[in-house]
Amino acid sequence: MKQLLSPWKSSERFTTTIFLYVFLALFLIFGALTCVFISIQKDNFKKEVLNTGTMLSQMLAQNVRLGVFSENQTQLYNAATALFNSPPVIEVSIYNPDGKILLQKFRDKSNTINVLLADSSSPSRSEIIKQIDKTITPLVVSKKDYDEFWMPVWSSETAQIDESLYFDHVVEPASKHILIGAVAVIIDQHPMQMMVYNLITRIASIAMLFFLIAGGATYLIVKTATKPLNSLLSQVSEHLGPTGKAADLGMLSTTFDNMIKNLTESFATIKELNTNLEMKIDARTKDLALHSRYLEKTNRQLEETLQELKNTQSQLIQSEKMAALGQLIAGVAHEINNTTNFITGALPPLNKVINQIKTLLLNQHPETVSNQNEIGASPETLLINLDTLLANISEGARRTSKIVKDLKNFSRPGEEDNLINTDLVANLESTLTVLYNEYKYDVEIIKDFQPNLPLVTCYPNQLNQVFLNIILNAIQAVQSKTGGKSKGTIQIIIRQQNSMISIRFIDNGCGVPRALKHKIFDPFFTTKAFGKGTGLGLSISYGIIKKHQGQINLQSKEGEGAEFEVLIPITQKMDRESDKPRTINPADQSA
Ligand SMILES: Nc1ncnc2c1ncn2[C@@H]1O[C@H](COP(=O)(O)OP(=O)(O)OP(=O)(O)O)[C@@H](O)[C@H]1O
Ligand SMILES: [Mg+2]
């Protein structure tokens, strides 16, 4: 088959092979079934012949009793003739007990019934008759083309009752039976063989038809079913190249085996690679985590350093500013003080000299003292004016001294790094003096200072900076609201609260918008025009108050004003090692 199919295209060859296998299987199954069916039918036919022969021979044996007994030919003839109505009966013979033929009728090839009336007795027949003497079923002698059914004929007295011919139950012959003859019915096997032959022919034609239809259908089904397999085969054979082997399921199976082997190997390699990769990823992840932690730490440190730098920068700027301002103020105060010293130093001797001039004038020319002279005023009047002018000069000198004192108090050169017991009221006053020019036209300062406040241990210079920043902000807030058209107010309230001093600065300026409240203490945050504000005032102030272990609190409504409260401890808790005020964690502060 392989040789037969080899020139075909491998896919067609595969389809045909499958088809032939399926067809062969069908053929074998159908053939086997047909054989079984025919054999069953044959058996049935045989049984039919047996039954017919048995029944006919029994009937004949019953019917010819009297005829045999009386050797009445007519009766015998009639009984025998009746049997020929059944087509397979080809011969009927009636014998006496010695085997002599009493009557024989037979059908020849032209279907004519012939009669043989008498014959000599035959020992072989008498032998058979003896054999069947006591049987109630016929003796069947099978020949090539026919079957002989031998049945004894008993006298009517001893014969089996007639009903037994028609019913199943068998009536045993009487023990005292008398054999008076025998009958033989010969049944032709031809009709049965013809029927079997016809059956086989019919089955064969049906089988042919069936195989034609089944073959076509099977071919179509196999072709459709093997289409994907064929394409797979073509691809496999294309892939394998000219191997010299025809593409078949064996090759497919080998290919699949190889594929599975390759796949298994590949999977093992992938698994190994995967494991390696996972290990590498694990190691890498750990490295990265370490790296990331290190980076985070470095980042934090950088941020902290940056913040510190910013703070330091802002502090530097502010302290430079304040130092410059302090120096300037101190210088100016010194110069004014010198000048004022001339005035205040000269005033008492001047007073003395004027008093002496007065005494001389009254003593030497008392008549002219009250007279008017050419300059339009009497010496008395002039002396009174002189007193007034001297008093004014004295007051001016006193005020100037106070301003100088305030200025000195504000700048306090040389005391920057010392903790000093300070009168906060005096410090506030000097700050207000320094700022006087800023607010004198637009702002009224309302002071509400608790009397007899204790001295506060602090860095007075730095607290002055705080007051200056807060008051200056308040002045600017009021000015930005009124625009110089009306006067605003800044209320300064100082109270002792247990161990703390509270200084509240309440202005009715523009206020701080809610969104900016958390930003205004950030360094460089300003809402002021470029060049007007650096955004450092409050951040520096916050740092200074923190250094003093105090707090700055803000309350404000946009458009209505702001209140800054500074809380300072009266005494500073010192750090034993550094002997400096202990700093407080900014997180504990609510600014
Ligand atoms: N009393 C106040 N009323 C309204 N806003 C205020 C008040 N005080 C401070 N602010 C707001 O807070 C911001 C920050 O103030 P801060 O003193 O730190 O900086 P600045 O005044 O802008 O500039 P600098 O003080 O460095 O000249 C101000 O720009 C202002 O917007
Ligand atoms: Mg400011």
Image: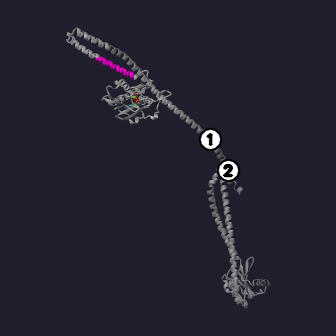
In the figure, 205 relative to 396: above or below?
below
Q: Is residue 102 visible?
A: no
On the image, the x and y values in percent for residue 297 come to 54, 34
Question: Label 1 amino acid?
Answer: Met
Give, as a single range, the part of the protein colored magenta: 391-409
Q: Residue at x 73, y 77 (%)?
A: 145
Q: Residue at x 75, y 76 (%)?
A: 144
Ligand 2, by image quadrant, is top left
Helix, strand or loop for disc 2: helix
Q: Residue furthest right?
A: 123
Foreground: 500 or 555?
A: 500
Foreground: 273 or 321?
A: 321
In this figure, which residue is indicated by the disc labeled 2?
Answer: 255
Foreground: 350 or 70?
A: 350
Disc 2 residue crowd, few under 14, some 14–19, many 20+, Cα 10 Å: some
Horizontally, residue 541 falls left or right of residue 490, namely: right
The quarter of the picture where residue 19 lies is bottom right
Dominant secondary structure (helix, strand or loop) of the stretch shown in magenta = helix
Q: Residue furthest bottom?
A: 70
Helix, strand or loop for disc 1: helix
The quarter of the picture where residue 3 lies is bottom right
In this figure, which residue is indicated by the disc labeled 1?
Answer: 279
In the figure, 480 relative to 349: above or below?
below
- Decide if ligand 1 comes within 8 Å of the CB at mark 1: no
Question: Label 2 amino acid?
Answer: Thr
Is 19 within the magenta?
no
The quarter of the picture where residue 278 lies is top right
Foreground: 297 or 39?
A: 297
